[in-house]
Amino acid sequence: MRRTLLKSKIQKAVVTDANLDYEGSLGLDEGLMKAADMIPYEKVHVYNIANGERFSTYLIKEAENSGKIAIYGAAAHKAGRGDELIIVSFVQLDEDEVEFFMPKVIILDGKNKIKEVR
């Protein structure tokens, strides 16, 4: 049996840009991607703390250490500049892997800098 578990979570990410005129995705600071063990084109779920909207999309790389978190395409209807987000990804594990697995949890400050890693 395989189980789906939380792999990575970025909490309190502040949207720095939203642009409807784009194919659609979530732009994320490359340094934050690395810290959270996320990669470009990985599927993520996004939870908007500001308005309760939830959506899934894929990641694209923004400049490392830029603090940029950008919502592109149709998702820009669900989150705007200044909104606070939770960004999560999941992994499927075999039953024997579950006991030893721990997700990466990254807590950000108000400027999208890492405040805490769990």
Image: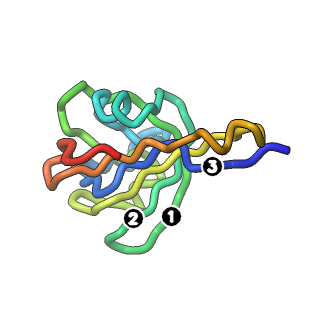
Taking 54 as reference, is 11 above or below it?
above
Could you tell me the amino acid type at mark 2? Asn
User: What quarter of the picture does the N terminus occupy?
Assistant: top right
Rounded to the nearest angstrom, the CA distance separating label 1 from label 2 is: 6 Å
Contact (CB < 8 A) between labels 1 and 2? yes
**Quick one: 73 or 25, which is closer to the camera?**
25
Secondary structure found at label 2: strand
The part of the image, by quadrant, that contains residue 98 is top right
Mark 3 or 1, nearer chain start: 3
> Residue 37, image x and y in percent?
44, 31
Q: Secondary structure at mark 3?
A: strand
Drawn side of residue 63 relative to residue 28, left or right: left
Q: In the structure shown, which secondary structural element does the residue marked by tag 1 occupy?
A: strand
Q: Identify the residue under disc 2.
A: 48
Q: Nearer the viewer, residue 12 or 58?
A: 12
Amino acid type indicated by mark 1: Arg
CA separation in Å, label 2 and label 3: 20 Å
Asked if marks 2 and 3 touch (Cβ < 8 Å), the reply is no
Q: Quadrant of residue 67?
A: top left
- Which residue is identified by label 3? 5
**Place of residue 114 in the rendered image (x, y in percent of width and height, measured from the top left):** 21, 42
**In the rendered view, does 40 fall on the left or right side of 32?**
right
The reply to whether the C-beta atoms of the residues labelled 3 and 1 are less than 8 Å apart is no
The 10 Å Cα crowd at callout 3, few under 14, some 14 to 19, many 20 or more, is: some
Based on the displayed image, in which of its 4 quarters is residue 29 positioned? top left
Q: Residue furthest bottom?
A: 51
- Is 79 or 117 nearer to us in this picture? 117
Q: Which residue is mark 1?
A: 54
